[in-house]
Every structure is written in structure tokens, then in C-alpha cells.
Amino acid sequence: MAKIISIDPGKSKCGLVLADVSEKKVYEAIILKSELIEGFVRNLNTVKNLSKIIIGNGTTSNEIAKKMDFFKKEIIIFEEKNTTFRAKSRYFELFPISGLKSLIPREIFILNKNLDAISALIILEDYCKIKFSLNQNIDFKTWLK
């Protein structure tokens, strides 16, 4: 099992997903304060034995990469252009609207959502050139640590 982390870096918060490439599944998705990312990835690496870290090349990517210097395997800085914009569409692929809600404009459902983890998913999907599915009940919508 090839466990990979993908990070959408930001000044105040970062989106992060943990996925298994061979299974094409996302097992964790979270949005963290940027200052917590190093400790979170260290702990995750201890438990999950990560094979690779993908970091979007946008805001603060070099700073985040430096924080990952403890990781002795491959760290890749990868293109993240338009991932936040694309995350809005991917959100509705992951969480389709049905029933009476479909009569309401879609944008209302993502007004205050943090899309950073979905952006991290898009970075991973672009890097791997495959679409990932969600493992059971992952909720991209409600966390900020």
C-alpha cells in the first residue's frame, strides 16, 4: 500500500489528504492551522509509514517543504494552479445535491466551506492522474484544527 499525503499550503491554514494510491481511496482529509502541519505529518508518518508527500506550489510551499525536512522519502512540489476554483466543482462530485435541495442554487451550499482539503485532493489527483474515491464517511466539510 502506497500511502501519500497531499498538502494545499496556505499562510494561515493548509488542506491535507491522506490517500492510498493502489486503492485509489482517501482515508483522511483535514484542514490545519499552518503552524500545526509539521507535527501532524510527523505523527501521521509514524503511524501510516508514508511513501511520499506532494505539496502544492502556491503560497508558502517552500516554507511547508522546509518543515518536512524530517521526512527522508520523496517530497514533491507540484503545480496547484486553479485548484481552489476547481474545488468548488469537485465538492459537488463528492457531495451531490439531491431532492428539494437541487432547486436551490448550488453555490449556497459552499459559501462558508473550507475547500482547502478538496484542493489538496485535486493536487493529488492531478499528480497521480487518477480520481480518488472517499473511504466511507469522510467529511470534507466540517473540520479545522
Image (cartoon, rainbow, N blue to C red):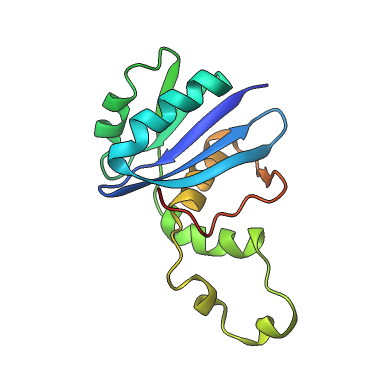
Give the x, y percent position of residue 47.
55, 22
Q: Is residue 9 left or right of residue 110?
A: left
Residue drawn where x is 49% and y is 58% of the image: 86
Give the x, y percent position of residue 87.
50, 58
Where 138 falls versus 109 (above or below)? above
Where 38 falls versus 85 (above or below)? above
Q: Is residue 140 visible?
A: yes
Count numbered badges in the picture. 0
Residue lying farthest right?
A: 99
Give the x, y percent position of residue 93.
65, 61
Residue drawn where x is 54% and y is 74% of the image: 109
Q: Is residue 78 left or right of residue 106?
A: left
Quarter occupied by the N terminus? top right
Give the x, y percent position of residue 49.
55, 18
Among the 4 quarters of the image, the one containing residue 2? top right
Where 55 falls versus 74 (above or below)? below
Q: Nearer the viewer, residue 116 or 125?
A: 116
Q: Nearer the viewer, residue 36 or 61?
A: 36
Residue drawn where x is 33% and y is 37% of the image: 36
Residue lying farthest top?
A: 72
Q: Is residue 51 visible?
A: no
Residue drawn where x is 30% and y is 42% of the image: 34
